[in-house]
Image (spheres, helix red, strand yellow):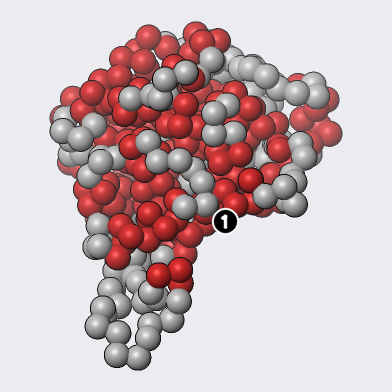
Amino acid sequence: MPKASIQDRAAGAIMGAFVGDALGLGPHWYYDLAELRRDYGDWINGYTDPKPGRYHAGLRAGQLSQAGLILRLTLESLTERHEYDESDFCRRMDEQFFPLLDGTPMSGPGGYTSQSIREAWRRRVQQRRPWAESGGHADTTEAIERTLAIAVRYATQTEHLAANVASNTALTQIDDTVISMTVAYGAILGLLVQGEPFDPTLSGKLMQLSKSGRLPFHIVTTGNLQAPRPGETEAPRAGQFASPDALLTPSYMAAAACDPGIRIEPAWKVSIVYGMPCAIYHQLPAAYYLAARFQNDFESAVLHAINGGGQNEARAMLTGALAGAQTGLDGIPDRFIAGLDDSASLLRLANTLASQVGS
């Protein structure tokens, strides 16, 4: 198979995220794996309806959760404005999205409203506070789930990627560690869209971007994390984020995925190794591991993400974007695209954004 073009990889990242989100709609948030297998069988291999009384009940197989719908809103803003326009994004949230919420979890588009969005809604709608004061302390991946579109748009413009992802994240989540890990994910996705492999060398490339000032992470060590030598002429670089460790995680996951002495079998058990909950520090290692292990196999990557239970929707969405960026749109099985609700519109958005990458 010929190597995917940057536009195909960009569209693959976006559609991969939509596929991962929709795959999780039915079997979302089963922390009891025996219950998950009882309701959906030994192996989930496609879109499923949510069961009555569970999250997203009443929606249908192939539809998007709220995370997917906000990703779509972000894409619509990016493609219509031809860039990240924060005022336009905020206007759409105020006018098109927040009026559909009531501040409770089990309501709103997509059947469930996450903590960070509920907190932003409360500050904007009930307290009438400005967007500069709308962010809360949720330690989850909701910001990644929408800013991945910003990361794809600015995949070849690292400074813009980092600044825009950080700024958009702070609208709903203000913890510095969450923002730094979100920016790191975006930078990783950007490198994959450019065509870099997800292997143990990836973190070195990210660290070089940080040392050059293109990623806003603090740097104090020299090459290969060695201590600065006496009389070192290259001064440490202070960045927006105190630690570059979020940039190091993907290479450790890639090394584990290719080390024959480290086996997670079956691969869905990565959710048990790194944790099933929603927090970003559980989600990212699992997504990185699956994306590194199944670099050329989109289907295996997202299905192992789903079959691990817990917060499998976010895990599959993040894994889907990383896997789709590696395989390209052509590497995503047709049945996943065809089974998405309103797939033609989603494809148009993905391809339009892909055509703007680097502009």
| In-front residue for pair 45/107 | 45
In the rendered view of the protein, which quadrant contains the C terminus?
A: top left
Q: Is residue 340 above or below residue 108?
A: above
Judging depth in this view, the residue of 320 and 31 nearest the camera is 320
Residue for badge 1: 252
Q: Identify the residue shown where x is 35% and y is 71%.
A: 219
Image coordinates for residue 130, horizontal then vertical, percent: 23, 52
Q: Is residue 48 above or below residue 81?
A: above
What is the x, y in percent for residue 109? 45, 26
Quick check: can you spot residue 102?
no
Of 313 and 174, the residue lying toward us: 313
Asked if one can make out residue 7 in the rendered structure from this viewpoint, the answer is yes
Residue 36 placement, left or right of 105:
right
- Look at 31% across and 15% down and name the residue there: 348
Tell me which residue sits at (63%, 17%) in the image.
46
User: Residue 301's x, y, as percent?
Assistant: 60, 31
The quarter of the displayed image where residue 102 is located: top left
User: Quick check: 261 left or right of 151?
Assistant: right
Instruction: From the viewer's side, name the closer residue of 176 and 60.
Output: 176
Residue at far bottom of view: 230
- Mark 1, other Cα within 10 Å: few <14 / some 14–19 / many ≥20: some
- Three-letter code, disc 1: Tyr
In the rendered image, residue 298, in percent from the top left (x then y), is placed at 55, 26
Q: Residue at x 77, y 40 (%)?
A: 265
